[in-house]
Image: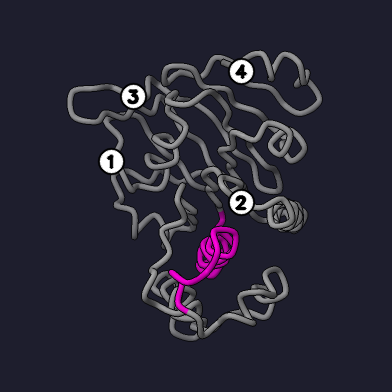
Amino acid sequence: MLETRDLTLKYGHSQILHGISMQAEAGKVTCVMGTNGVGKTSLLKAISGTHPRAGGDLLIDGESMGRLPAHALAQKGVGYVPQGRDVFPLMTVMENLETGYACLPKSEHFVPDEIFELFPVLKQMRNRRGGDLSGGQQQQLAIARALITKPKLLLLDEPTEGIQPNIIQQIGEVIKYLRGKGGMAIILVEQFFDFAYDLGDHFVVLKRGEVVLERDREDADRETLLKHVSV
């Protein structure tokens, strides 16, 4: 579903990503791992178009994306849940969800029942402002908003950060459900090692903006992975 070829990214004169080549398959969770500051979030920004890449190519479902901006990549099927969630604090839960309609034809401007089945709390709080939700509820809203766009590729940046354990468990179940449907590739950036290792089908470890280890689940020894992502 996703392929990057020699992807690079810069902030000003500082190069952050150095020739990242990787793939993410539909029906699988690809975990991008590494210590703080190695370029994980920058990689998701490059894939989502929220920060322009400096070089390399990005292919979705075999089609080169060229230099498409973020909104066009969203229309091509890239759903992005950023670190920090970025919900609209003064808009209601429903209004936040409805922002995903921009990627869809008018005939699909509705919230599918599946969204509220995955995140029942959002149905209960659909008229509450996004800024009034707890951190865990905001995280659920951010994921649900991305799912409204019907993505082929879902990018999740630190979905467990600052979240209470019961919601972490629920988010894990949602990821497993989405993977099981088979039509979506999921890229998970996560510092919570056990959460990532439990969900991962493929592992990519970054260090200083480069891929230093890449393993499928059956070849991914837990201790080797843990050694690479520990400080």
Circle nearer the viewer, 4 or 3 = 4
Stretch of the chain drawn in magenta: 129-152
Q: Going by the image, does 47 lie left or right of 177?
A: left
Q: Judging from the image, what secondary structure is the residue with disc 2 in?
A: loop
The quadrant the C terminus occupies is top right
Question: Counting residues from the N terminus, which is met first, the one under dot 4 or under dot 3?
Answer: 3
Circle nearer the viewer, 4 or 2 = 2
Q: CA distance from mark 1 to mark 3?
A: 12 Å
Q: Which residue is mark 4?
A: 230
Q: Main secondary structure of the magenta part?
A: helix
Residue in the image at 46% along x and 47% along y = 83
Residue in the image at 77% along x and 37% along y = 198
Residue in the image at 26% along x and 28% along y = 10
- Residue 73 bears which disc, if any? none
Circle nearer the viewer, 4 or 1 = 4
Image quadrant assignment for residue 182: bottom right
Q: Which residue is mark 2?
A: 163
Residue 77 to residue 46: above or below: below
Q: Which residue is mark 3?
A: 16
Q: Are marks 2 and 1 in contact (CB under 8 Å)?
A: no
Q: Is residue 66 visible?
A: yes
Residue farthest toward the right in the current orientation of the protein: 218
Residue sitting nearer the eye, 167 or 176 = 167
What's the amino acid at mark 4?
Ser
Question: Counting residues from the N terminus, which is met first, the one under dot 4 or under dot 1?
Answer: 1
Image quadrant assignment for residue 101: bottom left
